[in-house]
Image: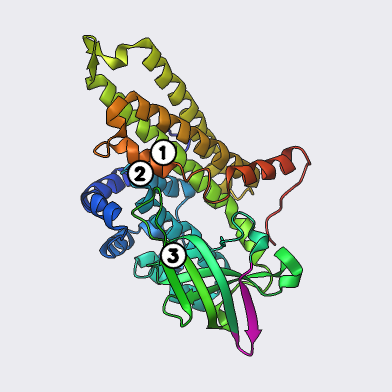
Amino acid sequence: MNSMYFTEEHELFRQSLQEFLQKEVVPHIEKWEKTGVIDRFIWKKFGDMGYFGISYPETYGGLGLDLFYMVILLEELQKINSGGFAAAIWAHAYLAMTHVNAEGDAQIKEKYLTPSITGEKVGCMCVTEPFGGSDVAGMRTTAVKKGDTYIINGSKTFITNGVYSDYLIVAAKTAPELGNKGISIFIMDRETPGLSATKLDKLGWRASDTGEIAFDNVVIPANNLLGEEHQGFSYIVQHFALERLIMGVNAHARAEFAIDYALEYMKSREAFGKTIDSFQALRHTVAEMASEVEMCKTFNYTTTKRMDMGEYVVKEATMSKLLSTKIADEVIYKCLQLLGGYGYMEDYPMARLFRDSRLGPIGGGTSEILKEIIAKIVVDGKDYKPAT
C-alpha cells in the first residue's frame, strides 16, 4: 500500500472491488467481448455497490469520496482484461456524468444524475465528429433555437456507449459564426425522434458499443441546455484534464497488469533447462519496463492528488496521457514478445491487451494534439485557465 496516497479505507475498497469484479464481471467478459453487448444487469449491480457514485454528491445518492477511490476503480477495471468493458463504465461515470453534475441544474440532476448513480440510466458523451476528430472547435453539428426548443442537426462518431446508452450529452454550435465561442452542451434522451445510431466495428475495445450518431431535426426542450449558451467549449476543455488523467491511469494499470502476467508466465516457461526469468536479456527488459511504468504511476498519483486539492492540472494531465499511453503500448508489445508464440494466441490475454491498448494514444485527444498543447504551455508560455 502506498500510504502517501492510499489509506486503509482505500485498500479495503480495493479488496471489495476486486472480489466484486471477479464474481460479477469476469464470468461474463468473454461473452461481452464476442457479442459487443454488455448485459444491462451489471450496470444496476455497479450502482447498487455505489461504484458510480463515489465521486458525486450525497444529495443525489453519491458518496462524495476523494479521487483516489476513482483511481482504484480505474486500475482494477484494467486488470480484468477488457478495455471495452472498462471504457463503457468510465465513459458513463466520468464523461457523461461529469457534465450532468457540473453543468446540470437541480431538475436535470434529479432526472439524470440520480438514476446514473444507481445504474438505472447509462450516458454517453458526444463531441467527436466524422470530419473533426480532435478539432473540437471545428464541429459542424448545429443547435438552432426555435421558441422554447432547440433543433439539432449533424453527426458524431467514435462515441463510447453511443448505441445502448439511455441519454446523450451532445455538443453543438448555437452560434457557428463565433467558432469555438459558439458551442453549447445539451442533454437528450435516446428515444428522441430523429436520433439514430450505428454501431462501429473496432480493432479493440470490443465489449463496448462505439457508435456513430446522426441528428436529423432532433427537437429538444430549451431547458435541456446544460449551463449557459455558447459556453460549451469552455466546459469541455474544463473536463479534458480529468479525461486525460483517467486515460493515463488506465494506461499505467494495464501496463502493470501485462508485466505481472508476463512474469508469471516466465516463472513457469522453461527453455534450455531453466525458466526464462533467469535469462539476463529478458530480466533487464522487465526491469526497464517496470521502471517506466512505476514512473508513470507515481506521476499520475501526484497529479491526481493535485487535482483532488482543486488545482487546474491541464499541463500535467496532458503529459500523463501522452506518456502513459505511449509507454503502455511499448510495454505490452514487449510483454507479448516475452510470451513468444503464446502471446499471439487469443487464448492468452496479451492479444486482447495489445489491441485494447492501441486506442490509448488516439482516444481523448491524439498524441499529436497533446504534444501541441504541451508545446503551447512549455514553449509559448500559454497559461490555460479554468472556466469561470
The residue under the point 49% across, 27% down is 292
> In this figure, which residue is indicated by the disc labeled 3?
162
- Percent x, y of residue 297: 48, 34
**Disc 1 to disc 2: CB gap under 8 Å:** yes
Amino acid at dot 2: Glu
Label 3 near label 2: C-beta < 8 Å?
no
Q: Is residue 305 left or right of residue 71?
A: right
Residue at the spot of label 1: 253
For the point 24% across and 46% down, which residue is it?
Answer: 22
The Cα atoms of the two marked residues, 3 and 1, are separated by: 25 Å
Label 3: state its secondary structure.
loop
Q: Give the residue number, with chain letter if any, for mark 2.
A: 76
Above or below for 213 versus 272: below
Work out how far the residue at label 2 is from the one at label 3, CA to CA, in angstroms: 24 Å
The kind of residue on which mark 1 rests is Ala
> What residue appears at the point 24 percent right and 38 percent down from the top-left corner?
347
Spatial CA span between label 1 and label 2: 8 Å
Which is nearer the N-term, disc 1 or disc 2?
2
Is residue 105 positioned above or below 204 on the image? below
Which image quarter holds the N terminus? top left
- Mark 3 or 1, nearer chain start: 3
Of callouts 2 and 3, the N-terminal one: 2
User: How many numbered discs, if any?
Assistant: 3
Left or right, 182 with respect to 206, comes to right
Q: Which residues are magenta?
A: 140-149
**Mark 3 or mark 1: which is in front?**
3
